[in-house]
Structures are given as structure tokens and as C-alpha cells.
Amino acid sequence: MRILAALARKLAGAGYFGGGESSVSFLSGIDKITFPGDTKTTLSATLSSARISAAGMANSGTAGYFGGGYTGSNLSAIDKITFPGDTKTTLSATLSSARAEAAGMANSGTAGYFGGGYTGISTLSGIDKITFPGDTKTTLSATLSSARISAAGMANSGVAGYFGGGWGGTQLSGIDKIAFPGDTKTTLSATLSSARSGLAGMANSGVAGYFGGGSDGSVSLSGIDKITFPADTKTTLAATLTNARRWPSRDG
């Protein structure tokens, strides 16, 4: 079974995995892992359509969002799971273009961001912003340093969000930083330890963010790079993923 799923996170509450692909079909279901007992339930709410390659991000404590994806054609819709009732609505706002394989990250309490992706014709560098709590969509004047798919996103909430790696005609190692609240883009001097796509990102806000796994174009990877805040220095952990892997689920 190939899982190309996104995860939205509720602070100190639960983690959510949505969509993906089984051996026979695309999926619309959403599984919930409740903290701290790590019990699993499946929501009665589902994604508005079965899909793979969606992006996830969350306004922690309030709602999680799944944007875009592919279900035989690319999607622009954004589904919202409202905490704690886990009800699903679909935003009237949509991504600026239908796309799959975008990356998501959020400045919790303020806004979430979807960057890059593939329209089916072209690879994108644009970044859409969903402003909380009204869930209005704007498109940043700042763009990724290059058009890309299969990047990873993570955020130091209240400070900045990061998009790392991806594929844009070649595997990428660069890390773009979106500084809050002005949404200005810089590219870190630090880079991933190897160019890669299909990786995952997550962060311990105020401390450090992590990019793990992916593929360098020929083999899957197990390494985990750490970006320490606020200096944005890169180190590579001695610890690695249990297995080399690409397309791990992302912590949005």
C-alpha cells in the first residue's frame, strides 16, 4: 500500500492522517491518534474527495486543513477539520491553482501556508496563505526560490516557516524561510545534507525544526537534518529513521 497522506496536528490533543492510496483505490478517510494514550479512531467525517498527495497544516488547538491533492485530476479545494468535534467543512477559499504535491506549514493562531506543487502541466513556486480565523486566501508576493514539488514544510510558530528540499527538474537541498508576520522570503545559507524530495518536516517551535527521509533521485534516505532556531544552523542527527524511506507522512 502506498501512503501519500498529510497530517494535521492539534496541540496537546491528537494527530490526524488523511487520504492516501490503498492497493486498489484512492482514500478519503481520516484517522485520529489521541494523545497521550495514542489510541486510534477513524473520523465519521471524510475528505471531500478521495485523494493522494495533499498537503496538511494546522491552527493548533482550533482546526486542521488539507489542501489540494490528486484524485484523477488535481484539486484546489481545502478541507477543514474543526477541533474538538472533528467536523469537516470545505472552505469557500481555494488554492490559487489546482495542484498536488505541495507542502504546508502554519503560524498557529495567525495563518497557514501552502507552497509549491504541480498543476499537471507546470511546477509551481507560489505560496498561498490562509488567514485565521476567517480562512481567507491570499497569494504571497514572495515565492519559493525555485518551482518545486515534494518539498517539506515546518514552522517555528510566531517567528517563521520553512520549506525544504523538493524536486524542480532536479533534486533540491535549499531551505526557504518565510518570516512572520511580513511574509518575506530568504533562503538559508544552511542546506540539507543532501538534495532530496519526498521528505517530511516537523518542528519543536522555539527550539528546532527537522527534515527527515526522502529520496536523492536514486535511493531512499534515512537521515534527519536539524535546523536550530533562531540562528538557522544545520546539523545532521546521529539518530536516523528505522528504515530509509520517501513519502513519509508530514507533520503539518
Image (spheres, rainbow, N blue to C red):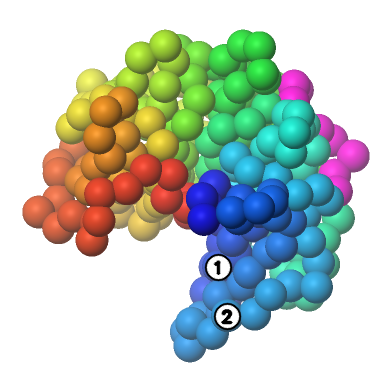
Q: Disc 2 residue type? A: Lys
> How many discs mark residues in the rendered view?
2
User: Disc 1 designates what residue?
Assistant: 15
Q: Nearer the viewer, residue 229 or 58?
A: 58
User: Disc 2 designates what residue?
Assistant: 40
Q: Where is residue 55 shown, x and y percent of the image?
A: 60, 42
Q: Can residue 227 be seen here? A: no
Judge whether residue 91 is colored magenta.
Answer: yes
Which residue occupies the extreme left position in the image? Answer: 238
The label shown at residue 140 is: none
Q: Residue at x 26, y 28 (%)?
A: 218
Residue 49 appears left or right of 64: right
Q: Of the residues under marks 2 and 1, which one precedes in the sequence?
A: 1
Q: Where is residue 224 shown, x and y percent of the image?
A: 23, 47
Which residue occupies the extreme bottom position in the image? Answer: 37
Which residue occupies the extreme front position in the image? Answer: 24
Q: Residue at x 62, y 11 (%)?
A: 122
Q: Can residue 194 be seen here? A: yes
Residue 152 appears left or right of 222: right
Q: Which residues are magenta?
A: 90-98
Q: Nearer the viewer, residue 252 or 27?
A: 27
Mark 1, secondary structure of its residue: strand
Label 2, residues with CA under 10 Å away: few <14, some 14-19, many ≥20: some
Q: Residue at x 75, y 49 (%)?
A: 50
